[in-house]
Image (cartoon, rainbow, N blue to C red):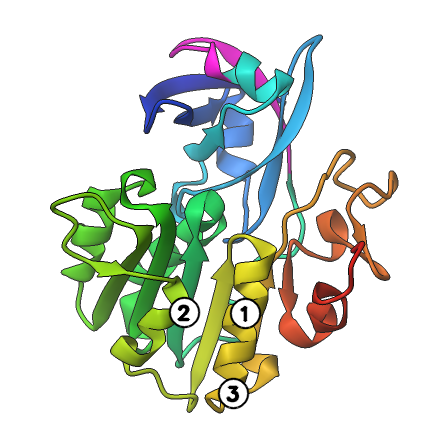
Amino acid sequence: MPARIIERIQETDNIFTLRLEFADPWMRRQYRFEPGQFNMLYLYGVGEVPISIVSDRRDSHRLDHTIRDVGRVTHGLAALQAGDELGIRGPFGRGWPVGEAAGRNIVIVTGGLGCAPAVSVIRHVLKRRERYGRLTIMQGVKHSDDLLWRDQYEAWSREPDTQVFLAADVASPGWEWHTGLVTSLFDQAGMTPDQTTVMICGPEPMMHAAAENLIERGFSDGDIWLSMERNMQCAIGHCGHCQIGPHFVCRNGPVFPYPEIRPFLSVRGF
């Protein structure tokens, strides 16, 4: 499906956001997605790449994708400007359990650019505040200079019944937040397992460590959800590149309840 770039935002030296709209007005009206799903963005004659949708689903006529320039396709996408066209396939995959989580507290734990799959669910909760309990957002980065959307986190922290905690392994002078691992924020956050759904995305070692830490604190593994990242190429479970155990991340995920994926996170080779 052809789409037009209506805005390009340079987030850092090698990270940018493309704001897209479908060229066909009918598609703008019909397209729907769930928080946590992804699209395949493609450049004609170059290839395609899976990218999380970071906008709120009420704005499905306007699709935001935050992208790191790390390969042939993303390098081509980085060269595009407002007014240029690309292709979209999607949406694909299983998203965050926003329906099951209604009426519960929400804890979101993210790391690095791995925060991108969580942005749409944060926006979803904040635009439907009456449906959910307390929202706790924890974001960790390797270096404080790597933090994306600093202004956005500060704005979210001012929302009702919402708390935001940021952590950097290494901090530059002037960093006002926590220095250390994102899991070291758990004590500060004052979370309780009762009526709480946890959503985690980021590097797999961080997600595994965070989930196990939460279980030690009394959280049920069934209340913990992870967004997995794999080399997704077909997005429909045919090519096998994204397989982990019996699961295809593109089709069965990318969001999984922790019990489904837990046995494979500590196995070398998966």
Which residue is at the front of the view, 115 or 213?
A: 213
Alpha carbons under labels 1 and 2: distance apart: 8 Å
**Who's the residue at 69% across and 76% down the image?**
259
Q: Which residue is label 3 attached to? A: 216
Instruction: Indicate whether 200 appears above or below 202.
Output: below
**Who's the residue at 47% across and 16% down the image?**
78
Q: Which residue is label 2 attached to? A: 183
Residue 247 appears at what percent x and percent y? 81, 59
Q: Tag 3: Cα neighbours inside 10 Å, few (<14), some, or many (≥20)?
A: few
Secondary element at tag 1 = helix
Three-letter amino acid code at disc 1?
Ala
Residue 203 appears at what percent x and percent y? 55, 52
- Left or right side of 193 for 204: right
Q: Which residue is label 1 attached to? A: 209
- Left or right side of 78 for 176: left
- Report if the CB atoms under discs 1 and 2 are less than 8 Å apart: yes
Instruction: Indicate whether 187 appears above or below 210.
Output: below
- The boundaries of the magenta stretch are 78-90
**Who's the residue at 60% across and 82% down the image?**
221
Check if residue 231 falls in the magenta segment. no
Disc nearer the start of the sequence (1/2): 2
